[in-house]
Amino acid sequence: MKKLKAFFYVYKNSMTSPKYYKEVLKTDLNFSLKYYFMLVLFASILITTIETVSVAPKIKSQISGFAENARQVYPDDLLIKIEEGKWSVNREEPFVIPMPQIPNENVPENAIVFYRQGTISDVDLFDTVVLVNDVNIVVRGANGIQARSLDNVPDIEVNKETFDNFIEFLFSFTRFLPYIIFIATLLGLLIYFIFFRLFYSLFLGAAIYALSFLNKKSMNYMNAYRIGLHTMTLPITFQVVLALVRSSLRLPLWFFILNIFFALVVLSRMEEPSLKKKK
């Protein structure tokens, strides 16, 4: 609890009190780094929570719509069998199963085409994800079109009931969707803040170091770097606010501009004797 109170004390003063920065320079680098890591942890959790609450229901709704469309495109009397590497379907060839449509998504027109005389070029002709010919299952994926022998496919029989049960089984995993989104987003943000923003802070420190001379309050680079770690409080907080209001700022380099502006305010109001104490 004491550490939490200490964090919020540093956070408040890093945001609102330029004169507080002379106290920062009386500490060591570990103090500033620990504060920064706590800051980005809280920011990442807040942004992740906001994104999860906003995005998860929309994705679940899309998946639900896709599942319902999938049930509708599979005919009630359709029977598909694969036995010993040979398939049969109770329809005339080529038989096409349309792709369940996803709102606002550009997807192929068809999901599966059963055509014994089909070739790889027919994948584009039928605009399908899967083409099943006499000996292969031809699949269009992220790495291009690949063919897999039917000999490696286990015996299976699919009718309307088994298809619906399969869709229901897949849809049951959507209950884990909020956790998946939360963990993936949190990890992504932590990587972003801990690696990219810490690398950025090296250049920020150099900029503040140069500005300190222009402001006639020269300091060594390490002090400038530590000031930069604390002045990032403002743009990171603004980043959280943007996530909260579900908005984005299209101004290039806005994070750096806001950061440098705040650093200038800090430099202009800091007391000069404190700047050279830490080396």
Image (spheres, grey):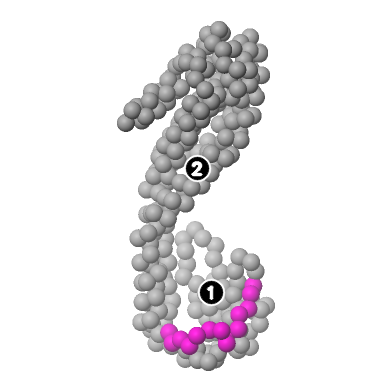
Q: Is residue 6 above or below residue 104?
A: above
260 magenta-colored: no
x 44%, y 38%: residue: 41
Q: Position of residue 233 (x, y in %)?
A: 48, 28
- Determine which residue is flagged by label 1: 110
Q: Position of residue 31 (x, y in %)?
A: 48, 26
Location of the N terminus (image quadrant): top left
x 53%, y 74%: residue: 110
Q: Which mark is residue 190?
A: 2
| Helix, strand or loop status at disc 2 | helix
Q: Position of residue 200 (x, y in %)?
A: 61, 33
Amino acid, disc 1 = Asn
**Left-right relation of 233 to 133:** left
| Helix, strand or loop status at disc 1 | strand
Q: Which residues are magenta?
A: 145-158
Q: CA distance from mark 2 to mark 1?
A: 39 Å
Q: Position of residue 69 (x, y in %)?
A: 41, 70
**Left-right relation of 241 to 111:** left
Dot 1 crowding, Cα within 10 Å, few <14, some 14–19, many 20+: some
Q: Does residue 215 appear anywhere in the picture?
A: no
In this orientation, which residue lies closer to the viewer: 149 or 102?
149
User: Which of disc 1 and disc 2 is earlier in sequence?
Assistant: 1
Amino acid, disc 2 = Leu
x 65%, y 24%: residue: 206
Q: Which of the 4 quarters of the picture holds residue 85?
A: bottom right
